[in-house]
Image: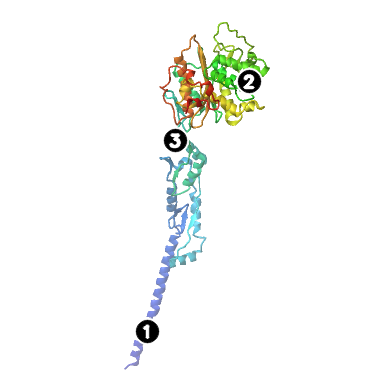
Amino acid sequence: MSVTGLGTRRRRQSLPILQFISVAMILMAVGLFILELVGFSQTQERLPSDVSVAGVSVGGLLPQEAVARWEQAYSQPVVLYYEQNPILLDPTQVGFRLNSDSMLARARAAGDVEAGFWTRFFNYLLGRQSQSMVDVPLSADYQRGLLAEFLRDISARYDRPASKPEYDVQTLTIRQGSGGYRLDVEAALTLVDSALRSPTQRVVNLPLQRQTSTAGNIDTLRDLIIAYLNEQGFIYDGQTTLASVFIMDLQTGEEVNILGDVAFSAASTMKVPILIDYFRHLWFSVPADEAWLMANSLLCSNNSSSNLLMQIIGQRVTGNADIFAGIENVTQTAQYVGARNTYITAPFVLGIEGQQLGSIPAPKTTPNSTYRTAADPYNQTTAEDMGTLFAMLYDCANYGSGLMAAFPEGEYTQTECRQMLELMSANDLERLLQGGIPPDVRISHKNGWVNDMTGDAGIVYPPNGRHYVISVFLWEQTEFQDYTRLWPLIEGISRAAWNYFSPETPLVAPRTDLPPTAQECVNFLPPQDQLDLNNINAWRGG
């Protein structure tokens, strides 16, 4: 065997296979490294995967793609709902503008603050992802003034103010106004601002301020009364017709005053001041015979009884049975408590042949000089004065004020004021003011009429507790009064007042159970031996 041949074979078996494989693997690793490095470098053109901008996820997007995405989100209209009505607000209408360059720069920087290039590269190779999202806050602005103007325009178009109460002349009732609402612009500005700055919550239910429905106030009652008189063809401030109305809410003090300061002939309504002055000078219980005089004066309008009461007053004031001293004192007391345009200067006419009346000078008064009703020069009052006297009686009887406060030396007691109102509650005419309220409702009142005038004044006591004073005087230039015209007018005014104070039980039509004329007082005057000023109707027996 040749030695040379063996040596040759050994050299052929020692080829550098391992080295070749190692070099190849190194080259492959370098190639893969370069490939991954190129791939990673290409991803660096995109935003970091853990970044959102203004609430919009843009991780891994190219800058232009990211900008397009958030601009598309914020260009969507904001839907405003006014009640059930949708209203679209295009952000450009209020000058809404995104600061995209600023937000993009911050988004790009978000990936650099966490680690260096090689750290991020090796994290990329190892598949490691950041566990904390980076949200770039919104950077935008708009013109708040344009938004406020936009909302005010919505308010002008959609707001519904509460409607005013209305009255119905046919039923003499007052209808409550409907409720309303209006946009709360200031509160809406905050809500819409939030919606403009949100990529997803872009619906706003506009805040509304509710306005409650309004019931008619006492001015509405005044308007209703005037409209009623006009509808009935009675001009309340005419040359030949005149209406004077005074109504007071005894709980609130609110008033209706329609020419309440015009002077009228007082007629028998003057018997209210006489009654008040009689009690002022009474320092003991009412004698039975004088109680009988009062009942005849107030319930039957008996002039003779009224004259005797004024004579009794004169006796107590001067010590002599001087009727003119009593007459003067009646006027003084009435004017002192607020009835400043009320006076009487002569006794009532008795219709007796040869009666010598006589008179005293009339005091100076200042009624409304624009309107004249040819008032009795010896016996005058106004609707406002009569209403004032009844209000003073009511406050005295119920609160210990009124007449008691005007005369604090003990001239009046609550019992006396209650007796006066109790007495007048038996004035059961069934017409005039009483004819405009439901049957059996308490009313303490006094009426009076002459050829050209009818008046009635008193206090109505509805079951709901809304007590009120009402005083109505109507004048028509004529020689003989047409009761079929004036009396129903007073009843209509009374019904309107009743419907205002008792809306839960209105009288929507005139009563059909009224007698043609007033009831005679024999139907409601108590027998003399059963007259009880504390319970005037006790004699009726249950």
* Mark identifier at residue 149: none
The residues tagged by marks 1 and 2 sit, at their Cα atoms, a distance apart of 150 Å
* Mark identifier at residue 333: 2
Q: Give the mark nearest the N terminus, 1 or 3.
A: 1
Residue 509: in sight, yes or no? Answer: yes
Which residue type carries mark 3?
Tyr
- Quarter of the N terminus within the rendering: bottom left
What secondary structure is found at the residue carrying circle 2?
helix
What secondary structure is found at the residue carrying circle 3?
helix
Q: Which residue is mark 3?
A: 158
The residues tagged by marks 3 and 2 sit, at their Cα atoms, a distance apart of 60 Å
Q: Give the mark nearest the N terminus, 3 or 2.
A: 3
> Residue drawn at (34%, 87%), measured in percent from left and top?
9
Q: Which residue is mark 1?
A: 14
Which residue type carries mark 2?
Thr
In the picture, measured across the screen, residue 413 lies left or right of residue 524, that is: right
Q: Position of residue 183 (x, y in %)?
A: 48, 38
- Image color mode: rainbow
Residue 259: in sight, yes or no? Answer: no
Q: Position of residue 112 (x, y in %)?
A: 50, 60
